[in-house]
Amino acid sequence: MLKIGVLASGRGSNFQAIIDEVEARRIPAKIEILIVDNPKAYAIERAKKHGIPHLYINPKEFQTKEAFYEKIRDELISRGVQLVILAGFMRIVKRPLLDAFPNRIMNIHPALLPSFPGLHGQKQAVDYGVRISGCTVHFVDEGVDTGPIIIQAAVPVHPDDTEESLSERILKLEHKIFPEAIRLFAEGRLEVEGRKVKIKDYKLPEIYFANPEMRE
Ligand code: GRF
């Protein structure tokens, strides 16, 4: 069974969605460890509740970013982790970790990449005035939200949307597509060719394009 390691910095609602799918046995995987860079992350409470080991690694204890990521890498490798999940991990991953897990680190971003990468993807979408936004699960490379795209889901942006209201709408779909992408990985159905991710025997569910419940 696939061994997963999760990195998080905050509330961990995506982490929870993944825990739920793993516990329901819809993802053939085991979550070996949660690593946080913030001792107050609510994700820790979720790990405790579900009997998942957790570890706080303080970035300030390291001379360089590389050394911080070497420590994370070593902790993940020592537990036999095969797939790393960034579930609201608010840092740019550096070489030591990327090199140890090529196309084996997944992130979720709250916008339709390549639009609105970086922080506050939802606010960027509202400020820009786009009519459609959404979320993207992608493999992580050295850039900021630039790696090969696995799944995307779209939501409408309404004229009166705020960052908060759009974030809420997008988050519901994040909780569906992130576990879905992990499931596909765990089932050995993802193949990366250059920038593109091939998914074996897969048709994107229509809900990812337009969810009738989300219409006004
Ligand atoms: C989500 O909006 C995700 O897209 C972004 O960070 C946020 C994490 O939320 N990468 P949570 O901690 O999973 O609740």
Image (spheres, rainbow, N blue to C red):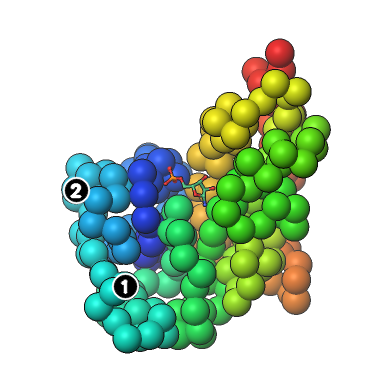
Nearest to the observer: residue 107 or residue 114: 114
Numbered disc 1: secondary structure: helix
Q: Can I make out residue 212 in this image?
A: no
Residue 34's image quarter?
bottom left
Query: Going 69% across and 60% down the picture, which residue do you hit?
Result: 149
Q: Position of residue 31 (x, y in %)?
A: 33, 58
Q: Can I make out residue 111 in this image?
A: yes
Residue extending farthest to the top is 216
Nearest to the observer: residue 165 or residue 78: 165
Query: Going 37% across and 72% down the picture, which residue do you hit?
Result: 81
For disc 1, does the CB lie below 8 Å from ligand 1? no
Q: Residues within 10 Å of mark 2 (few under 14, many from 20)?
A: few
Numbered disc 2: secondary structure: helix
Residue 13's image quarter?
top left
Count of numbered circles in the view: 2
Seen in the image, is 40 located left or right of residue 182? left
Seen in the image, is 33 located left or right of residue 84? left
* Residue placed under numbered mark 2 in the picture: 48
Q: Position of residue 66 (x, y in %)?
A: 41, 85
Q: Where is 203 relative to 38, above or below?
A: above
Q: Amino acid at mark 1?
A: Pro
Which numbered circle lies on residue 148?
Answer: none
Q: Residues within 10 Å of mark 1 (few under 14, many from 20)?
A: some
Badge nearest the viewer, 1 or 2: 1
Seen in the image, is 130 located left or right of residue 102? right
N-terminal of the pair, mark 1 or mark 2, is: 2
Quarter holding the C terminus?
Answer: top right
Nearest to the observer: residue 62 or residue 96: 62
Q: Position of residue 106 (x, y in %)?
A: 53, 62
Q: CA distance from mark 1 to mark 2?
A: 22 Å
* Residue placed under numbered mark 1 in the picture: 59
Residue 23's image quarter?
top left
